[in-house]
Image: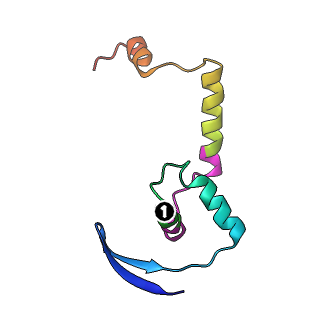
């Protein structure tokens, strides 16, 4: 891997050369633009950030509660915030 310094608008940037299998590169080429990235480099930088600082993941319990909430909403068993305030006689 080689590096090359370049000054970017967000501070100092380092250019690196990385070898990836052709199949992975093909997958990257298929998705970077679909996901709204301006270019392939931006997509790869974001992936590297996620590898260094993985996004928070929900616990199994939280995922279970979310699934239950979705099911309740689909069965129309939920009420809005305004409905709850009205039922309890609360003002803003």
What colouring style does the render use? rainbow
- Given residues 58 and 15, the one toward you in this image is 15
Q: Name the residue rendered at 43%, 18% in the picture.
A: 84
Q: Position of residue 76 (x, y in %)?
A: 61, 17
Q: Name the residue rendered at 47%, 59% in the picture.
A: 39
From the image, tell me which residue sits under label 1.
Answer: 46
- Given residues 54 and 42, the one toward you in this image is 42
- Given residues 60 and 40, the one toward you in this image is 40
**Quarter of the image containing the N terminus?**
bottom right
- Given residues 59 and 52, the one toward you in this image is 52
Q: Is residue 66 above or below residue 71?
A: below
- Farthest-out residue, bottom: 2
Q: Is residue 39 above or below residue 72?
A: below
Residue 15 location, quadrant: bottom left
Q: Position of residue 89 (x, y in %)?
A: 35, 12
Start-end of magenta stretch: 48-62
Within 10 angstroms of label 1, few (less than 14), some, or many (20 or more) residues? few
**Quarter of the image containing the C terminus?**
top left
How many badges with numbers are in the image?
1
Q: Position of residue 62 (x, y in %)?
A: 59, 45
Q: Name the residue rendered at 40%, 15% in the picture.
A: 88
Q: Is residue 71 above or below residue 90?
A: below
**Magenta region includes residue 16:** no
């Amino acid at each position: 891997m080689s590096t090359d310094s370049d000054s970017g608008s967000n501070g100092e940037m380092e250019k690196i050369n990385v070898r990836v299998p052709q199949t992975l590169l093909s997958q990257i080429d298929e998705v970077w633009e679909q996901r709204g990235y301006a270019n392939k480099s931006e997509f790869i930088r974001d992936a590297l950030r996620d590898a260094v600082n993985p996004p928070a993941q929900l616990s199994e319990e939280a995922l279970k509660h979310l699934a239950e909430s979705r099911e309740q909403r689909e069965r129309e068993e939920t009420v809005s915030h305004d409905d709850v305030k009205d039922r309890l006689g609360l003002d803003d």
